[in-house]
Structures are given as C-alpha cells and as structure tokens.
Image (cartoon, rainbow, N blue to C red):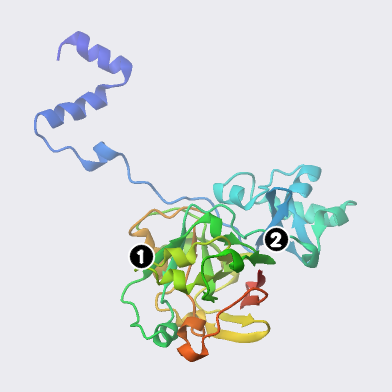
Amino acid sequence: MNTNRRRFLKTTGLAGVAAIAGAGALGRAIPVQARIGPRPKADPRALPKGMTFCTLRQGDGYGLGLKTEKGILDVAAAAHALKENAPTTIDAVFKGEGDLDALKRLADKARAGAQAASFFVPEAQAKFGPAVTNPEKIICIGLNYRKHAEETGQQVPKQPILFNKYNNALNSHGGTIAVSKEPAKQFDYEAELVIVMGRGGRNIKEEEALSYVFGYAVGNDFTARDLQRRSSQWMLGKSCDGFAVVGPWLVSADQADGNNLKIELKVNGETRQSSNTSDMVFNCQKLIAYISAHMTLKAGDIIFTGTPQGVINGMPKDKQVWLKAGDKIETTIETLGTHTFTLT
C-alpha cells in the first residue's frame, strides 16, 4: 500500500475495514467477532424490589400505578406535582426511562403532602389496563402442567411447546371479552402464571434465569377450542381480541416464588381449577433458558407459563359446557392477587 493510500485510510477511520477486507481477499479466516461485532451483553439495569405495579387507564392512554397501603399511587399525577423524575408508564420502566428510585421517594412525598388525596386512587374505583401494555413478545407454553397433560390424554412434553399471542389480545382486570362476536362456540378458560422479563438476553443460563425476571402477574390464556383445532397450529384459537388477560398487579420478582404458588380459577363463583405452579413440567428458569436459546428475550416480554388441570377441554365430552356470554371468570394466584373479567 502506498503512503498516500495509507494516510487516506487513517484519516477517514477505514483502516480497520480495509484490513478485514484484505484478509478476506487473501483467503485468511476472519474472526467472527471482527465480522459481526461483540456479542451483546445482558441488560445490566437494576430491577425493582418490594414494589407492586399496575396500569391505570387515563383517557386514551395508560399511566403507571404503584400499590401502597394508602391506595394506588397515580404516578404521573404525583410526579408532575411533586417534581420527581419517575417513570410514568410501565413501558417507561422497562425501557429504563426516568429514575426508578424516585418511585419510592414519590410515594413518601405523596403520603405526607397536603394534596395526598388527589394522588391516590382507591382500588375499588381504579380503572385498570393490562399490567403490561406493549410487550414485543407474548410467548405461551402448552401442556406445561403434568395433570393437565393427563386430563387431555396427551403425553407430558419432553421440551416446552411454544405458541404465541399478539398485543391485540391484551386485556385487563375488570375487562370484557366479546365472545358473541367471535366465529366460535367452544370458549374455555386457562388460569396461568405470567412471567414478565426485566432484562434482555440471549442464551440465558438456567441458573441465572430468575435474575432476568422483572416480576409476575396473574394471567388467563382464554381460548376458543374449535378455532384452536382448525389446524395443527394453536394460534387462531388463542389470539382473538382480549384473549390475554394480565393483571391487575405486576409484583416484583423478589416478593414471590414463581415455582411454588397456589393457582385457582372460578366460573360464576364455582371453583374449576385449583393447583400449584410446582406442578409445572418446566419451571420458570427452564422456560426462560429454553426460549432464550432460540430468540432474544427483551425487557417487557411476557411468558404465559401454561395452565393446570380443570379446563373444560379436559372434561368428558358429555360434561363439556362451554363458556358463554354473561359468564364471569375469576383467576387468583397466591401473592399476586385476583383478576376478573366478564364475557359479553
């Protein structure tokens, strides 16, 4: 290379590119790291502890709520009035926007201030949105409880069965599902623990997986069985509008053991499902490790971990009475709370 050529490359910052291109032209192996850059590292941001979040409907949008003994703190209203740089939506929390530590300061200030009454919403009066409002991925797991696999006459899976929902399916505590508008008749409930990711990562090690969890929520993987069975793919029966109820609370991971929580579901006050997440075939950390071996998980992604025994689809055919408009579904998970929704 002549002197002028060398000087040009140095001054334009292309010397490294030229070296790689030259090596390729000469047939020498180019290190993978040089070709594609360094492997992305896990998101190092701190995750919340001792906090229980929710989403509050505010006009056409959503705002962040923080559960306290005084009621639900309306974070957006308090942050504006009390001049704290706190994240004001759950999506902002996942993105690392604002000061997460400011949430506790904000709660303390709001309790003590003269305007306290205007910052807190009584739970009974709150209008909830989905606990997570904009996940990039909604990943669901099929046949992940041993007794559920047995009741449906299927083998316990040797590896997780993955399917998906989309954001149009997101629904909330106190919400409705318009089953009368869907081209289906065989509607079924599925009480589920929902994992919410707090850090992104790929190829997450099983022994480190729980450190990536932001928190847990109560979920219901509502399903139209006749649509689900139309083909070998389950998606159609799982992805109708409102078929993914999540919330009302998003409980920080340090407050719950996702692998050992009582889970129950009632229809019109009658208990239909009663189990424990300890019956999962693949526990929380195994699911995270398996999924992240195939795709990058991101903060805010949610994982429906499967449903226990007691679904209508697992009953003898002569006892299958499918859900209908007017039915009220109540799902409860120990430590995480209860959500209800109604069919219309």
Residue behind mark 1: 290
Q: In this view, does 166 lie to the left or right of 41?
A: right
Residue 207 percent coordinates (x, y): 39, 67
Residue 213 percent coordinates (x, y): 50, 62
Q: What residue type is labelled 1?
A: Tyr
Q: Which amino acid does label 2 sit on?
A: Phe
Query: Dot 1: few (<14), some (14–19), or many (≥20) neighbours within 10 Å?
Result: some
Residue shown at the point (58%, 62%) measured from the top left: 242
Q: Residue 128 shows which numbered tag?
A: 2
Tell me the quadrant of the picture where the C terminus can be found. Answer: bottom right
Residue shown at the point (80%, 60%) measured from the top left: 121
Query: Dot 2: few (<14), some (14–19), or many (≥20) neighbours within 10 Å?
Result: many
> Height in image: 53 above or below 75?
below
> Height in image: 179 above or below 95?
below
Q: Quadrant of residue 332?
A: bottom right
> Height in image: 315 above or below 188?
below
Residue shown at the point (47%, 56%) measured from the top left: 137
Q: Is mark 1 on a helix, strand or loop?
A: helix
Residue 49 percent coordinates (x, y): 61, 62
Please say whether residue 249 is visible from this viewpoint: no
Outermost residue to the right = 114
> Between marks 1 and 2, how big is the CA–CA gap?
32 Å
